């Protein structure tokens, strides 16, 4: 692990596995997690020759947690600073859930800078909350209730949110570990990014995306229902759907072997 300064007084934790790999993949975690959510992809991708870059977003994991900077523009700017520093000519950019929204904003804001391929995993886009002209998201009242609960009982809010995360049973030790990862940041960064999830609208960002894009989603997803990836597929040129019939929001884990196989095939194609 090393740190990259993304603005004055703010540094992000960067994890760089197999730096000698011939191809680079950059993975961006979702809310309210950190880079550790990709553990079972990190076990595989370096064996396939990939250099694997991941970060803890500001406010999560081992990265700094300033009071400000939790909108998608600033989070995309953070990605740019890390990608610029890495110094490779091209890479595959991967985002899960809120990370999917952030990488979409990056692709638009920085004109696909150094990105040759994009993977969206259970992406919270184009709108996390259902609104006119953008159906398929969660009801506003449900997200507001989650935000209110974070403000008074964050551990319970994270526990309740986690109940809808997996479509397949997980063991109690795994569930306990996953909750600990979800509580890795302070309350205010968890709250502010939840507000960004609620308020952001990425419908104007798709025009800039031209690279091959894989849209991976769980058919049983209760957090980002399948109407969202279907909309992404219609709006993003050169995109392909990868549905997982027995997966929920945790498309990266519910059908782990199948996901890793299809994900790695997309990366190597």
Image (spheres, grey):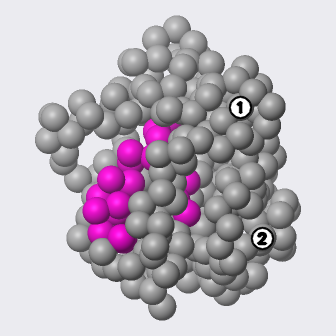
Residue 38 in the magenta stretch? The answer is yes
Q: Residues within 10 Å of mark 2 (few under 14, many from 20)?
A: some
Residue drawn at x 59%, y 51% as measured from the top left: 99
Circle 2 or circle 1, nearest the eye: 1
Percent position of residue 207, x then y: 83, 73
- Magenta residues, as a range? 26-46
Q: Residues within 10 Å of mark 1 (few under 14, many from 20)?
A: some
Mark found first going from the N terminus, 2 or 1:
1
Residue nearer the viewer, 23 or 135: 23
Residue nearer the viewer, 199 or 88: 88
Residue drawn at x 74%, y 52% as measured from the top left: 81
Residue drawn at x 30%, y 74% as measured from the top left: 47
Task: Return the residue at label 1.
Answer: 10
For marks 2 and 1, give the CA distance.
Answer: 22 Å
Q: How many numbered callouts?
A: 2
**40 relative to 239 in the view: left or right:** left
Residue drawn at x 39%, y 48% as measured from the top left: 37
Q: Is residue 108 visible?
A: yes
Identify the element where label 1 is drawn.
strand
Q: Is residue 195 visible?
A: no
Residue placed farthest to the front in the image? 20
Percent position of residue 38, x then y: 39, 54
**181 relative to 172 in the view: left or right:** right
Task: Return the residue at label 2.
Answer: 113
Identify the element where label 2 is drawn.
loop
Q: Which mark is residue 117?
A: none
């Amino acid at each position: 692990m090393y740190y990259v300064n993304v603005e004055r007084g703010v540094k992000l934790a960067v994890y760089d596995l197999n730096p000698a790999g011939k191809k680079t993949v950059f993975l961006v975690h979702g809310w309210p997690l950190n880079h550790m959510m990709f553990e079972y992809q990190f076990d595989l991708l370096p064996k396939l020759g990939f250099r694997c870059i991941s970060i803890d977003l500001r406010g999560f994991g081992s990265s700094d947690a300033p009071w400000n900077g939790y909108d998608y523009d600033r989070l995309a700017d953070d990605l740019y600073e890390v990608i610029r520093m890495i110094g490779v000519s091209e890479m595959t950019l991967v985002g899960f859930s809120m990370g999917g929204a952030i990488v979409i904003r990056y692709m638009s804001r920085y004109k696909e800078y150094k990105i040759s391929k994009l993977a969206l995993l259970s992406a919270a886009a184009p709108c996390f909350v259902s609104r006119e002209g953008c159906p398929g998201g969660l009801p506003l009242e449900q997200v507001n209730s989650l935000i209110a609960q974070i403000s008074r009982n964050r551990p319970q809010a994270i526990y309740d949110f986690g109940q809808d995360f997996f479509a397949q049973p997980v063991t109690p030790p795994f569930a306990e570990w996953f909750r600990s990862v979800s509580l890795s940041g302070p309350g205010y960064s968890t709250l502010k990014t939840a507000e960004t999830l609620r308020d952001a609208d990425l419908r104007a960002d798709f025009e800039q995306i031209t690279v091959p894009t894989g849209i991976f989603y769980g058919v049983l997803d209760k957090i980002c229902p399948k109407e969202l990836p279907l909309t992404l597929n219609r709006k993003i040129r050169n995109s392909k759907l990868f549905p997982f019939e027995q997966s929920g929001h945790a498309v990266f884990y519910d059908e782990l072997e199948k996901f890793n196989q299809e994900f790695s095939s997309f990366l190597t194609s």
